[in-house]
Amino acid sequence: MVDLPTMETLITLAANEVEKAAVRLGHMIRAGTDAEQKLTLLIQYREDYESRFSASRAGGVSVQDYRNFQLFMERLDEAINEQERVVAQAKQDIDLARKAWQECERKRASYDTLASREKLVRFRKELKREQKETDEFANRKARLNKAR
């Protein structure tokens, strides 16, 4: 049996770890959301730029302008690919942070369960002790009444 003050300390420490893990998970989720938004903006920018270039191409463009467009599109595609990797990594980080938070929460809950069980055991022992005292008192009183 673990004494209750020790168990309460363990519960407090576990609750602090849950809080830290929750904060970390929140940061990971925000970073993931930011990464996804940046990816969306890059994709939209690429689409818009391509549309504008296609519209201006109707009037004719020089070979140099077309080559510049191709180079710029390649750079945009590279940026999009890199941002897709960032998003994928962010999703992995979120999953790891979520698992860490869940593990901390499981640990805290198990300490709570142990503490509840310990309190119940102590409560039952106290009831038995009180019942024993009551029975002994009743027996003494009955013996005194018989002796009179």
Image (cartoon, rainbow, N blue to C red):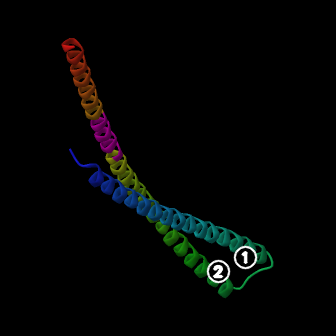
Disc 1 target residue: 53
Disc 2 target residue: 69
Would residue 72 be found to the left or right of residue 138 on screen? right
Q: Is residue 19 above or below residue 137?
A: below
N-term-proximal mark, 1 vs 2: 1
Q: Amino acid at mark 1?
A: Phe
Does residue 96 appear in this view?
Answer: no
Question: Residue furthest toward the top?
Answer: 146
Question: Viewer-proximal residue, 106 or 98?
Answer: 106
Question: Residue furthest toward the front?
Answer: 148
Crowding at mark 1 (Cα within 10 Å: few <14, some 14-19, many 20+): some
Task: Identify the image quadrant of the N terminus.
Answer: top left
Give the quarter of the image for residue 15.
bottom left
Start-end of magenta stretch:
112-123
For the residue labelled by badge 2, is the local secondary structure a helix, a strand or a loop? helix
CA–CA distance between discs 1 and 2?
8 Å
Would residue 134 be found to the left or right of residue 56 on screen? left
Residue visible at 71% across and 71% down in the picture: 48
Does residue 12 appear in this view?
Answer: yes
Question: Residue furthest toward the bottom?
Answer: 64
Give the quarter of the image for residue 19.
bottom left
Crowding at mark 2 (Cα within 10 Å: few <14, some 14-19, many 20+): some
Q: Amino acid at mark 2?
A: Phe
Residue visible at 64% across and 70% down in the picture: 41
Would residue 132 be found to the left or right of residue 75 on screen? left
Label 1 with label 2: CB-CB less than 8 Å: yes
Question: Residue furthest toward the right?
Answer: 59
In reply to whether residue 9 is colored magenta, the answer given is: no
Q: Which mark is residue 3?
A: none
For the residue labelled by badge 1, is the local secondary structure a helix, a strand or a loop? helix
